[in-house]
Image (cartoon, rainbow, N blue to C red):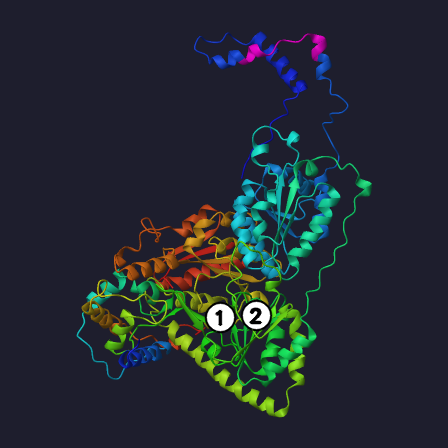
């Protein structure tokens, strides 16, 4: 049974993830993560396999959302890692601690904003 | 390939010839050393030496044993293939069809043109790729047993992809004609049984006239929607021996079947449902068989001003058309009437599925939504292989070829369009156009994420390629799993600009099928480009030798993520589910240590290779060099080291 708090978090998370362009959340409050360690975990524990090394998103069975500069608040991000709604497997505490998730969150927050399409290719 | 030649018949005449030679040799041979192999001595002692009269009598060629012939059954078979307009026959040479092979070269003057392949899987996949561009099949030939087993996976891909391919497999039907060894190993009682569950039809002709009629029938069955592969067994003696009754042989008159149009009353009912709908939606997969198919689908969509979600089994709908909503699948949940045309997996399109411990699914459609199907896919199904997918309830099920039925359906819709409906349609169309435009802009922004990263993002790889070929008459004929960037960023308009995927998901399709498509594009002077995974590449790298040998121009981009990446993700999901060992999922899934240098592999096959490209700033110049080469008529490979997806 999904409680109201979890429902709200997932609804917010899905709304943010479904917006394909990365946006910066106005009010993101979360624990201070270690972005360097977050990058290490992101690559070691295979987050990059679906979401890309640059957090650009990708495809598993369906689209894997963009994570670079995610607009999700930390709580929503952690909720999605623990029990995601689609085909993504839920990462339990045995695989990723809350500290690990905080570090990953700090890493995806630190990823650079995309360059303007106009400056990178004439076909863009 | 088996390179064996048939052993000489152990006839008495040959035996005595040998004995005579042995006898003569024995008279002049030096004495055997003491440590000589005893078997040689033993062989010499077996043949009793005959007298001169017996030798003379036995070595005279009997009238019933001719050594030359002026025609062969293979000549007639070649004429039959040419009567059907088959341009090419992709082969991996094999003694069980040596009669036909020789006849094509000498009687047909290499017409159909032989395309030499180094594996049967390559030959069939080339035929699949060719057929989807050229709208007609080429032939493929192989050993009937060992060769057909190699060919089988590619035939399964063609079956699932509903692509016409005509496969010939050598056999030797009469047991008493088989020589020892390979003739037996390469013969079967029912050779087509191996592939019968994923071919539309097969036969083993017992006479030349039987061959002619069965080959014409095979061509007809393969090219009649729903299309698919067919198989014909070639008896060796039928190919090789003189034609016994030339005056009575007849090449059949062939007429292509006109694809079936759906029932007119049913199409009228579908038109009424669509015209009255608030939010109609078209979903499609393999609609366009010919260039007319694209135009017909556009006409229907524009008449209704409804969204089109193209699952891209073929090039069905222009990617930049304002009504193209292929990346807006939420529309499925908003539609009140869904028209599904030539869908391969309708259930998968209108339901959601979660691959979790308890696999869950639910309808993606809104309650009360009506589903209309139009297509021929279900007219020919088989039992064993489950490629037909899960049952889906529908409200109106019309059997008829999508492309053939569209004009009648669209005219019926137009008749129902009064001014009020036209206004509503126009308003709907404007909203969809705005959504399409937003999707295009989002795609451009999304593609810029990680633009300067190494490994190179797949978005940048696709954008850079398009940047350099967009002014060519290009044809994209291959892509990797999940690589949607071309359809998000490129402007697809013409039918030959896309030809779909493997069908059965059998890895090893992409490189040879792309080359087959390039073969079809060559005479139209189109610029053929394909993306292919590194894992796929390694199944059939020998395809590049065929590209070089036959000078087939193609720009082949290796999407080198150094892994069987889809499996890497599936394996990770397993480890996460089990709560253990997530950091070791590279075992058995990655292609590293050593990294494979695909450019060097290509050069070894006679194809120019660029790469491995790891710095994104090196990609543009490498592509420019490769493109120049392709435009000069050569194949080229660019190995791009990429992020996974």
Q: Residues within 10 Å of mark 1 (few under 14, many from 20)?
A: many
Question: Is residue B553 visible in this depiction of the protein?
Answer: no
Question: Residue B419 location in percent, x, y?
Answer: 62, 92
Quadrant of the rendered structure where residue B446 is?
bottom left
Q: Is residue A59 left or right of residue B433?
A: left
Write down the residue under mark 1.
Answer: B349
Residue at position x 41%, y 49% from top? B600
Residue at position x 58%, y 79% from top? B301
Q: Where B327 falls versus B586 (above or below)? A: below
Q: Where B461 falls versus B61 (above or below)? A: below
Q: Nearer the viewer, residue B95 or B612?
A: B95
Question: Residue B601 location in percent, x, y?
Answer: 43, 48
Question: Is residue B332 visible in this depiction of the protein?
Answer: yes
Q: Nearer the viewer, residue B591 or B448?
A: B591
Residue range highlighted in magenta: B43-55
Question: Residue B360 location in percent, x, y?
Answer: 40, 68
Q: Earlier in the sequence, mark 1 or mark 2?
A: 2
Q: Nearer the viewer, residue A117 or B396?
A: B396
Q: Where B52 falls versus B215 (above or below)? A: above
* Mark closer to the observer (1, 2): 1
Write down the residue under mark 2.
Answer: B316
Quadrant of the rendered structure where residue B255 is?
bottom right
Q: Is residue A15 left or right of residue B150?
A: left
- State the SS at label 2: loop
Given the image, what chain letter belongs to the residue carrying mark 1? B
Q: Is residue B79 magenta?
A: no
Q: Is residue B52 magenta?
A: yes
């Amino acid at each position: 049974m999904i409680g109201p708090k979890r429902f709200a978090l997932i609804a917010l998370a899905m709304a943010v993830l479904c917006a394909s362009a990365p946006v910066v959340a106005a009010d993101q409050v979360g624990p201070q993560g270690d972005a360097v360690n977050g990058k290490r975990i992101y690559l070691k524990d295979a987050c990059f396999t679906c979401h890309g090394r640059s957090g650009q998103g990708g495809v598993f069975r369906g689209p894997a959302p963009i994570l670079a500069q995610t607009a999700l608040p930390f709580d929503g991000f952690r909720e999605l890692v623990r029990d995601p709604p689609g085909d993504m497997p839920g990462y339990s505490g045995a695989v990723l601690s809350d500290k690990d998730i905080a570090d990953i969150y700090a890493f995806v927050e630190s990823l650079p904003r995309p360059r303007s399409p106009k400056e990178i290719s004439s076909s863009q | 390939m088996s390179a064996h030649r048939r052993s000489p018949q152990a006839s008495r005449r040959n035996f005595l010839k040998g004995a005579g030679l042995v006898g003569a040799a024995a008279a002049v041979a030096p004495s055997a050393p003491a440590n000589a192999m005893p078997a040689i001595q033993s062989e010499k002692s077996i043949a009793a030496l005959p007298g001169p009269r017996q030798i003379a009598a036995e070595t005279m060629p009997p009238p019933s044993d001719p050594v030359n012939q002026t025609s062969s059954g293979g000549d007639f078979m070649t004429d039959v293939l040419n009567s059907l307009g088959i341009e090419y026959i992709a082969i991996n040479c094999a003694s069980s069809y040596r009669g036909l092979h020789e006849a094509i070269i000498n009687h047909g003057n290499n017409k159909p043109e032989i395309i030499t392949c180094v594996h049967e899987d390559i030959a069939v996949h080339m035929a699949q790729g060719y057929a989807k561009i050229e709208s007609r099949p080429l032939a493929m030939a192989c050993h009937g047993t060992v060769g057909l087993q190699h060919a089988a996976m590619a035939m399964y891909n063609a079956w699932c992809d509903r692509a016409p391919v005509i496969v010939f497999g050598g056999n030797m039907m009469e047991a008493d004609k088989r020589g020892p060894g390979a003739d037996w190993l390469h013969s079967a009682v029912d050779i087509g049984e191996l592939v019968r569950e994923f071919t539309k039809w097969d036969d083993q002709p017992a006479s030349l006239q039987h061959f002619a009629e069965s080959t014409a029938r095979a061509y007809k069955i393969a090219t009649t929607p729903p299309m698919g592969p067919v198989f014909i067994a070639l008896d060796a003696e039928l190919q090789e021996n003189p034609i016994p009754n030339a005056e009575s042989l007849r090449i059949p008159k062939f007429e292509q079947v006109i694809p079936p149009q759906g029932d007119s009353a049913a199409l009228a009912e579908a038109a009424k449902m669509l015209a009255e709908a608030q939010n109609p939606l078209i979903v499609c997969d393999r609609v366009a068989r010919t260039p007319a198919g694209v135009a017909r689908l556009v006409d229907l969509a524009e008449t209704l001003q409804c969204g089109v979600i193209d699952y891209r089994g073929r090039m069905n709908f222009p990617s930049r058309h304002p009504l193209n909503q292929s990346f807006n699948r939420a529309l499925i949940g908003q539609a009140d009437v869904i028209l599904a045309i030539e869908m391969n997996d309708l259930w998968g399109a209108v339901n959601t599925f979660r691959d979790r411990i308890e696999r869950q699914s639910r309808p993606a459609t809104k309650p009360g939504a009506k589903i209309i199907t139009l297509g021929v896919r279900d007219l020919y199904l088989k039992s064993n292989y489950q490629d037909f997918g899960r049952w889906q309830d529908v409200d109106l099920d019309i059997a008829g070829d999508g492309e053939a039925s569209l004009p009648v359906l669209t005219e019926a819709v137009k008749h129902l369009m009064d001014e009020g409906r036209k206004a509503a349609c126009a308003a709907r169309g404007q909203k969809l156009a705005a959504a399409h435009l937003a999707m295009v802009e989002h795609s451009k922004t999304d593609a810029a994420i990680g633009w300067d990263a190494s490994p190179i993002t797949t978005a940048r790889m696709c954008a850079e390629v398009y940047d350099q070929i967009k002014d060519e008459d290009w044809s994209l004929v291959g892509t990797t799993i999940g690589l949607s960037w071309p359809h998000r960023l490129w402007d697809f308009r013409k039918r030959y600009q896309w030809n779909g995927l493997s069908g059965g998901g059998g890895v090893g399709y992409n490189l040879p099928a792309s080359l087959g498509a390039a073969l079809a594009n060559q005479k139209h002077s189109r610029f053929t480009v394909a993306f292919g995974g590194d894992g796929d590449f390694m199944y059939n790298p020998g395809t590049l030798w065929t590209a070089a040998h036959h000078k087939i121009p193609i720009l082949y981009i290796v999407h080198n993520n150094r892994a069987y990446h889809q499996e890497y993700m599936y394996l990770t999901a397993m480890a996460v589910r089990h709560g253990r060992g997530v950091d070791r999922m590279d075992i058995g899934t990655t292609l590293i240590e050593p990294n494979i240098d695909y450019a060097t592999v290509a050069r070894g096959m006679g194809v120019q290779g660029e790469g491995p490209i790891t710095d994104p700033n090196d990609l543009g110049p490498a592509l420019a060099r490769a493109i120049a080469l392709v435009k000069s008529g050569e194949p080229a490979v660019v190995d791009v080291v990429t992020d996974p997806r």
